[in-house]
Image (cartoon, rainbow, N blue to C red):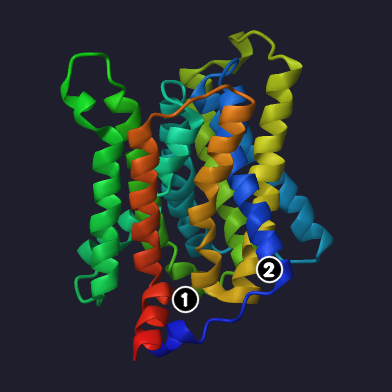
Amino acid sequence: MEQAMSQQPSIKALDWSLLALLSVLWGGSFFFSKLALADLPPLTVVLCRVSLAALALFVYLRATGTRIPRARPVWGAFFGMGLLNNIIPFSLLFWGQTQIASGLASILNATTPVFAILVTKALAPETDVTANRLAGVALGLGGVAVLVGGDALSDKGFPILPMLACLGATLSYGFAGFFGQRFRRMGIAPAIGAFGQLTASSLLMIPVVAVMDRPWTLAAPGMVTLGAVLALALMSTALAYVIYFRSLSAIGQLNTSMVTLMIPASAILLGSLVLGERLAMNHYAGLALIGLGLIAIDGRLWRRLRGASA
């Protein structure tokens, strides 16, 4: 395992540029969704995001001549992944953002690798968890505790439920990561998997939104909201997937995962400059602990320090 990790491809200037762009796109998803939620309910925003992104990826796949599978087991996997990777986390994050700042939601979302390790160990106990990953989990959970702070125990209207909703989204992402491992065994290409899960998510969300939100009764959204929805679907979902898959192919999973460290910075910057959001000091302290946890989980810095001291 250590050898496989050390053989990750090197990162070139173009790769760094694409990772930075990906962090802006995914960090921007918190910003765009905050704008969209001003006029639209969370479930409707979820449906708009997944359906428009699925349509965009369908056009992309057709333009590249990629064949879309029709086998039932494949689409069963798409529906399972769509539920875990899109519907549940998007719904929880968007509802949470109606109560808390987009930057804080992005910090909580950065705990995804921590929950991924916990889920993997729970569902596959034979999985080897290294000491640096255990340290990363501890730091990440410590960061969450700092984020919540002592105010969670007070009666001052602290938004504990929205924060728990965001953490529930990261837990769902953890299950999705474990579930999605079957895609490689089934021979499903990443772009096909993205299109399939987004399409399945759209089909599942249509009746839910029809019953819960009755969107035909809502007031017509403004141009800012429409623009935010389009940006959320086309830029932060469809385009982001294409860049993500390119990065996976070019520099590997471990290198690509570093984007997780960069997303909160983009979301916080956009929220501060455009939305006027301000975060408390414990939020930044929690972000620092989560960042240290992710660095520990990644493990490369620790290995380099050990190599330098050897």
User: What residue appears at the point 42 percent right and 25 percent down from the top-left corner?
Assistant: 100
Read off the residue under disc 2: 15
Q: Nearer the viewer, residue 106 or 188?
A: 106
The image shows residue 16, relative to residue 39, as above or below, that is: below
- Furthest residue toward left: 153
In what element is the residue under mark 2? helix
Eye-nearest disc, 2 or 1 = 2
Read off the residue under disc 1: 185
Dot 2 or dot 1: first in sequence order is 2
Q: Nearer the viewer, residue 47 or 301?
A: 301
User: What residue appears at the point 50 percent right and 27 percent down from the top-left corner?
Assistant: 43
- Where, by quadrant of the figure, is residue 300 drawn? bottom left
Q: In the picture provided, is 194 more to the left or to the right than 105?
A: right
C-alpha gap between disc 2 and disc 1: 27 Å
User: What residue appears at the point 73 percent right and 52 percent down from the top-left corner?
Assistant: 58
Residue 132 appears at what percent x and percent y?
A: 28, 71
